[in-house]
Amino acid sequence: MTDPLVSIIVPVYNGGAQLARCLTTILAQTHAAIELLLIDDGSTDGSGAVCDQFADRDRRVRVRHQANGGIGRAQNAGLDAMTGDYVTFCDDDDLMSPRLVERLLAGLVDSRADMSQCRWANIGASQAWERYRREAASPAPPGRVVAFGQPAVKYQTIFSKASRLRRRDGEFQYFNEANWGKLYRSGLWDGLRFPEGVVAQDVYVATELYLRMDRAAARDDVLYYWLQHAASQTHSSARSRSFSYHRETLDCAFHNIAVGRAAGLFTLRSHCQLVFEQDLIAPAASSAAERDLARDYRQRCRQALAALTRRQRLQVRAAAGWRSWETLVYNQTVHRRR
């Protein structure tokens, strides 16, 4: 029997000095049956040429060059082109453990799951490569794997540290909308694509994607290195983000709430997002039109929260309080890494 083919999708936009290291770690996977799909999204710093050089050296690499359209469009191009039985994603400045695909695939197959995930390390760029090399040379033994049902319920319920600590195996059942560090059965993406031109494309599809799953598996191996630095747009302070960012974040929350409602799912996480964003969107408005739109969004937030039962409103208030405190701690630690 041949090993199953795993597609790895990497949207590339001005990957800079980290791109070559990222691609090197992907091609070093111990599960060799991979196709690496590099979607060059209009890079202007030579990243497209780097992608072509890797394709010239390794036949498992395929490159698509396209005009800049944002990460959602690039990810969709990868999904359209993939031929693997399974698929995972990687950001163009992050690193993969050589055993990421091997261990995630084993966890998924052994657990008869639709998705498996690993733990990740938030790490500063200056330390990442040395840590990768050290752990690649002396790998830790495979860690514990926990499988669980109702992934959409877990996603919408177990997201604060407090909620994880209250549950047995809560840390295993916690996962977010980020597509990296996860391995999916490719069929989960049939007919499902990211919205294009928005900043929170992964959040937008999250609830629908997890509702398609019967079972997920998580293992406690650290297999993905998520590089963080203070200048990153993704990790900038929420209060300094643009009006369009807050508008798009609210659009995602409203979409997830509607998807959850249709499935009979109380979307606690998405309702908490309404609590946070209703206080952030108005200060970000810089024109009369944006201020009018901000008032409309705030009214929609109030209406959505008022539609909850009293118990649900209490749950949202408690979860939002815990999450706010945790975010404050996170901003003072991870965001300051170099």
Image (cartoon, rainbow, N blue to C red):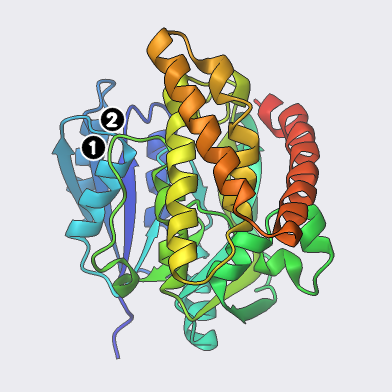
* CA neighbours of label 1 inside 10 A, class few (<14), some (14 to 19), many (20+): many
How far from the left and from the top, in percent, is residue 314?
A: 78, 54
Number of numbered labels in the structure image: 2
How far from the left and from the top, in percent, is residue 27?
A: 37, 55
How far from the left and from the top, in percent, is residue 245?
A: 46, 28
* CA neighbours of label 2 inside 10 A, class few (<14), some (14 to 19), many (20+): many
- Residue denoted by label 1: 40
- Residue denoted by label 2: 47
Please tell me whether mark 1 sits on a helix, a strand or a loop.
strand
Q: Residue flagged by tag 2: what amino acid is it? A: Ser
Please tell me whether mark 2 sits on a helix, a strand or a loop.
helix
Q: Report the residue that reaches farthest toward the top.
A: 287
Q: If the image is split into quadrants, where does the N terminus sit?
A: bottom left
Taking 209 as reference, is 110 above or below it? below
Q: Residue flagged by tag 1: what amino acid is it? A: Asp
Taking 201 as reference, is 59 above or below it? below
Q: Does residue 133 appear in this view?
A: no
N-terminal of the two: label 2 or label 1? 1
Which is closer to the viewer, label 2 or label 1?
1
Q: Does residue 309 appear in this view?
A: yes
Measuring 47% from the left and 84% from the top, which residue is drawn there? Answer: 109
Specify whether 119 is left or right of 255: right
Circles 2, 1 touching at the beta carbon (< 8 Å): yes
Disc 2 versus disc 1: distance between alpha carbons? 7 Å
Specify whether 312 is left or right of 250: right
Q: Nearer the viewer, residue 1 or 335?
A: 335
Q: Name the image quarter holding residue 71.
A: top left
How far from the left and from the top, in percent, is residue 110?
A: 52, 87
